[in-house]
Image: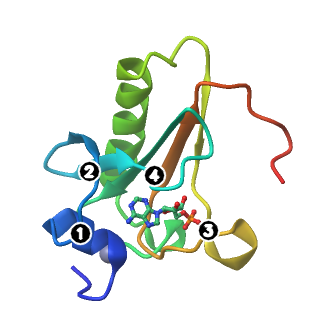
Amino acid sequence: MATDCLFCKIVRGDIPATRVAENDHCLAFRDISPKAPTHVLVIPRQHVTSLNQVESATLAGEVLLMAAAIARSEGIAESGYRVVFNTNGDGGQTVFHLHAHLMGGRAMHWPPA
Ligand code: AMP
Ligand code: ZN
């Protein structure tokens, strides 16, 4: 846990979030500023700064499996969706606690801006 990390505060319940799924490894909640009809963030409970710091295949896999499960529960698995890990400056990362953006419910553009 990082005391001054926004997403660690959500894990602890110090900051409210609309939770959509959780298990021993991960937590998922709705993005506060959604960029698609479905826009959910999946994070590990453990503080990991970015994809650059991921050392556990289990942790990475749990995040991805939860994203896929939420795609099913949100009804977008068949229509399609995108899972994105923005990483550091050029990647557009603004919160430095690893998170997967699960986005769907509309057609995505390629390449992303
Ligand atoms: P990134 O820019 O990839 O680091 O993504 C950070 C995301 O966190 C953005 O899409 C924000 O809208 C979202 N966000 C920031 N604060 C909160 C919050 N308190 N609850 C939910 N989502 C948040
Ligand atoms: Zn954190």
- Give the spatial CA distance, label 2 vs label 3: 19 Å
- Give the spatial CA distance, label 4 vs label 3: 17 Å
Q: Which mark is residue 1?
A: none
Residue identified by numbered label 4: 31
Residue identified by numbered label 1: 15
Q: Earlier in the sequence, mark 1 or mark 3?
A: 1
Q: Residue at x 55, y 11 (%)?
A: 78
Q: Is mark 4 within 8 Å of ligand 1?
A: yes
- Give the spatial CA distance, label 1 vs label 4: 13 Å
Q: Is mark 1 within 8 Å of ligand 1?
A: yes
> Does residue 56 lie above or below 7 as drawn?
above
Q: Earlier in the sequence, mark 2 or mark 3?
A: 2
Q: Earlier in the sequence, mark 2 or mark 1?
A: 1
Q: Residue at x 52, y 48 (%)?
A: 101
Element under disc 1: loop
User: Do we see residue 47 in this rendering?
Assistant: no
